[in-house]
Amino acid sequence: MNKKGLDEMQVQKKNSIGNQAFVMLLYLLMLDAGLYGFGFRWISYPANVMIILTLTAGIYVIRLITANAFVGPAAKTEKPLMTVVMTMFFAALISAAILVLMNNTSFSSPGQIEEISAPLLFITAGVAMVVAITTLIIKRIQNREDE
């Protein structure tokens, strides 16, 4: 990836998509709070906010990738395999640290943490792999277009 990062058009597109994602997040959270006030509970409290946040962040990243505003143009061809492996390792390490911290704190019962530990590790590592592989694909496509 180029040291300069994104060009002006990519920065403007990224800011525009970010503003729209923030407004969408705001509206979804307000809708959820309004429905909660009327007695409609689709999922218990912490999970509903996390699902809305994850959904909005996913839409944000997908829109950035489709708008070609996720990574800057690359200066040379590079071998990003080590970067992909380190990203996956780092994501798994963070997932394990979150599980250990949640298990040692008194936010919830220990049985609850054991029930969600495997899906949490799987989802976090899966998302890291998808982001790393998508970034790799985008870099290669941009390199082909530049040459």
Image (tube, grey):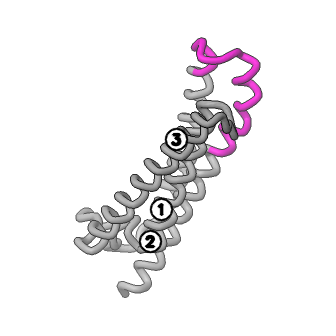
Occupied quadrant, residue 19: bottom left
Query: For the magenta stretch, what is the residue range?
Result: 102-123
Occupied quadrant, residue 116: top right
Q: Secondary structure at mark 3?
A: helix
Say which label, 2 or 1, has the lower sequence index. Answer: 1
Q: Secondary structure at mark 2?
A: helix
Q: Which residue is mark 2?
A: 139
Closest to the camera, between mark 3 and mark 1, is: 3
Residue 90 bears which disc, if any? 3
What percent of the width, then of the height, locates residue 107?
59, 17
Closest to the camera, between mark 2 and mark 1, is: 2
47 relative position to 81: left or right: right
Cα distance in 3D space between marks 3 and 1: 15 Å
142 relative position to 53: left or right: left
In the picture, the quarter occupied by the C terminus is bottom left
Q: Secondary structure at mark 1?
A: loop
The residue nearer to you, when weighing 76 against 42, is 42
What percent of the width, then of the height, locates residue 113?
70, 24
What percent of the width, then of the height, locates residue 95?
59, 35
The residue nearer to you, when weighing 1 against 95, is 95
Image mark count: 3
The kind of residue tagged 1 is Pro
The kind of residue tagged 3 is Phe
For label 2, the crowd category at 10 Å Cα-Cα, with few meaning under 14, some 14 to 19 and many 20 or more, is many
- Could you tell me if the residues under marks 3 and 2 are in contact, i.e. CB atoms within 8 Å? no
- Could you tell me if the residues under marks 2 and 1 are in contact, i.e. CB atoms within 8 Å? yes
Residue 63 bears which disc, if any? none
Q: Is residue 11 magenta?
A: no
Residue found 70% across the figure and 15% down from its top: 109
For label 3, the crowd category at 10 Å Cα-Cα, with few meaning under 14, some 14 to 19 and many 20 or more, is some
Say which label, 3 or 2, has the lower sequence index. Answer: 3
